[in-house]
Image (cartoon, coloured by chain):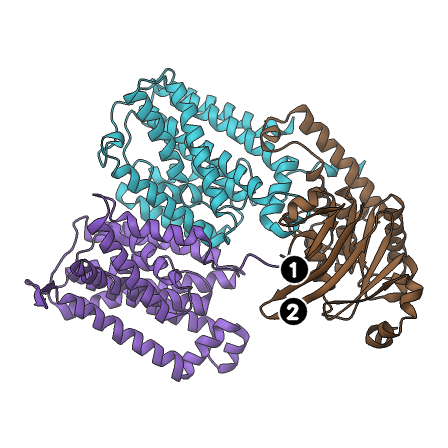
Amino acid sequence: MKSLLWPTVVLVGAGLALVLIQSDPSSLELSRVAGIYALLALSVGISYGQAGILSLGQAAFASVGAYGSAIVTTRYEWNPWAGMVLAMALAAGLAYVLARLLVRLSALALALATLLFGELVHFALTRGGDLTGGYIGLPGIEAPAPLDSREGTHLVVWAVVALVVLIATNISTSAEGRTVRGAASDPVLAGSLGVAVPVRLSAVFALSGAVAGLAGFLFAHSSGYLAPESLSIEMSIAALAMAVIGGRYSPVGPVVGALVVVLALDLLPSEDLAGLFYGLLIIAAIVLLPRGLLGIRRSTPVSPFRKKASA
Amino acid sequence: MSLTATDIHVAFGGVQALDGASVHVEPGEVTGLIGPNGAGKSTLVNCLTGFVAIDRGTVWIDGIAAEGSSAHRRARRGIARTFQTPRIDPDASVADNIAMARHRLNRTRLPGSVLRTPRCRREERGDVTAVHEAAERFGLTDVLQRRGSEIPVWQLRLVEVARATLLEPRYVMLDEPAAGLGGAELELLGSSIRGLAAHGLGVLLIEHNFAFVRQHADTVTVLDRGRLLATGTPQAIAGNRAVVDSYLGATA
Amino acid sequence: MIEFVVQGLALGALYALIAIPLSLVWLTAHTLDLAIGGYAVMGGMAFATASDRSTGLALALGVGALCGLVSAALFVTLRRLGATDPMAPGLVSVGVLIALGSLAQAIFGIDPAFQANFEVPIEIGGVRINPQVFLNFAAVAVILGLIVVVLRYTGLGRAMRASAASPADASLVGIGVSRLQSLVFVLGGMLGALAGALLVMTSGLSFEFGLGLTLSAIGAVILFGLRGPVTAVLGGLTIGVVEALGSGYAPAGIGPAVPVLFVFIVLASGVFDFDDRTVRP
């Protein structure tokens, strides 16, 4: 099973890392942040690498999921795991509607629209009154076991990362992935072959939204608090930079990108400079590494056609 | 049962591209569509396949008016096409390019692909077989692993035809598939087109090479400046005075 | 009502000022320079540090030109590397925008800068007006006039229009296309900085304003179809008025969201797009 290779590597890596850092709270915190960033970067990789939708508002979907779950668990005493389902469904639904509205636009207009969407979500959260807690946000979000311990959080977050890597692998190697990449690259051709282009691309964007919503849920329920700035525009840009740096066409590239970036950010002297760092990062990624660290081109996923050709 | 366009009018920004054009495609037959450059042949194909909105006139798919049906719905109803300028994903392999046409027959969508359901695996195995069969028919087996950007235009035309047939359509519109093809490939294409008709498909063949049309078409429709000029058997068209004057005289 | 409109026009004039270079960048380089709001932040904050207005303005223009030069270098590098689409330079400019915002915070701190020129508003026909409006309008009018004259009547302008139509023709005029494009980016830096300085005098500026300014400028250039500096100015004024009316009449607190929502709707409606996607086969 080739598709299980990378998810297994991620799981084993996370297990080994836990042995090494289990008594070190700051390293565990870093691993939590890196894992959540990896999920966000994976969601960018799925939408940008497969459906060609470059989202500059991915953190907004995480925000929607995080706030959705935080509100129902703190105000209406939902079970946190039901909150998780809600987080993913809300983000996916919103992403689907947004994509259906916007996929007919050119790539640049679409990217700008996602940026504007992110701003609108941010506005809504800061001015949401008692519901969202305004600028202050929501404190006291329940951490269900095993998210109530640093070790448990580490394991859960990275197990989810492994699962999403498996999902991304399955999409990129499947017939549906082939169709979606083709539809993104030439909608006219895809239409002539009976592909309902807006529906197919929006479905992938919805999945990417669900992954972002899940990242938001994990963030909210492992941090215990949530503010409009927790999942900000900088985070959207950072996730994009990570996906581009690692390689957006590779199912595991965004994870590599997230690890590199978060570890580098940890070495930065001041948190105020994070924006400068992310900005320079995305510039460097696009100018120096257009295909990412893993250097993967769009169609490299091993095609089933290879076997028979050599036979 | 037929694909018919009657009295089609289309204008682009003041230019009357089609001004009462008609064509009839019968299952099991090859219909040649000829005419000088700018006669509206490709526009008529775009009208049949739903890529261009019609100002006046009707497209009938098996007796049902196709009004308002989008391009992808018409493809799903069994109308395949190729493009005058071949369209290919330059980054994907030729195999992946051809396999895209299997989307219509497969039922697995995103959820099934994510979960790799048994149906997903079965359908993907079916894709491999189908693509290899189509590649063999059109002499493309050796280039299946090449990227779309790496193969010459004449071969892209064959990729387009192979892809269109993989849609398992009932009608197929071929927009100048023979342009740039040499002797052996031309023969291969001609016999493939006859083979499609023999399988019961209705073929519409746009072509400038009248000898090729005459050899393979059952009926020929001639367009001139957006209007229907003549329609009939290849022999009748070759002897039609108006056609010879306006078009064939210059090329044949 | 009229006071809101006037207030909106004062702000709109500044949006117009940053929309002008945005439209010129599109015309000559076929991309969007999303860092424009960052130039305004850097320029405006630099202006506010100076002891007097003229030093401040010189400082702002210098900082702006420097930022524009960096963007120009990045753009030319990307084109040399073979990025022909508007996307890659657009994304890089988002990186520049984020970096400049963070840099402004690090250099100038988090306190907003506000230095009003006029303590008391004047009254015209019963409407109280801050004279800063006239200053902003004068700035836009002069700059727009100069640019239109340059575009219409000089060799440089002809080269710019030619480079929009076809880069090869522009080379024939004798000016290198990349030099021309770089010039427009630097001009963008300087006009952005000027707008930032004027914003410090109009209603205040803080390091976080970059993205909002960029979004307003984009709204301004696309509102009437990305045709050139004149429509960009009209768009800027419209966005300013919409924003002022939004903060005046929309339910409490959602005023600032109105222009963003407005631009989002313009984009989503599809009436405007950067590249025509409805390509006929």
Question: At 30% from the left edge and 65% from the top edge, which residue is drawn?
Answer: C16
- Dividing the picture into quarters, in which one does residue C278 lie? bottom right
Question: At 75% from the left edge and 59% from the top edge, which residue is drawn?
Answer: B153
**Closer to the camera in the image, C166 or A264:** C166
Label 2 sits on what residue type? Gln
Question: At 51% from the left edge and 73% from the top edge, which residue is drawn?
Answer: C165
Query: Where A222 sits versus C98, above or below?
Result: above
Q: Chain of mark 2?
A: B
Q: CA distance from mark 1 to mark 2?
A: 12 Å
Query: Do circles 1 and 2 both sit on a common chain?
Result: yes
Query: The chain shown in cyan is which?
Result: A
Tell me the SS state at disc 2. Answer: strand
Label 1 sits on what residue type? Arg
- Dividing the picture into quarters, in which one does residue B19 lie? bottom right
Query: Where A31 sits versus C21, above or below?
Result: above
* Earlier residue among tags 1 and 2: 2
The residue that mark 2 highlights is B16
Q: Position of residue A180 (x, y in %)?
A: 60, 42
Using a 10 Å C-alpha cutoff, classify the residue at mark 1 as few (fewer than 14 neighbours), some (14 to 19) or many (20 or more): some
Residue C221 visible somewhere in the drawing: yes
Residue B96 visible somewhere in the drawing: no
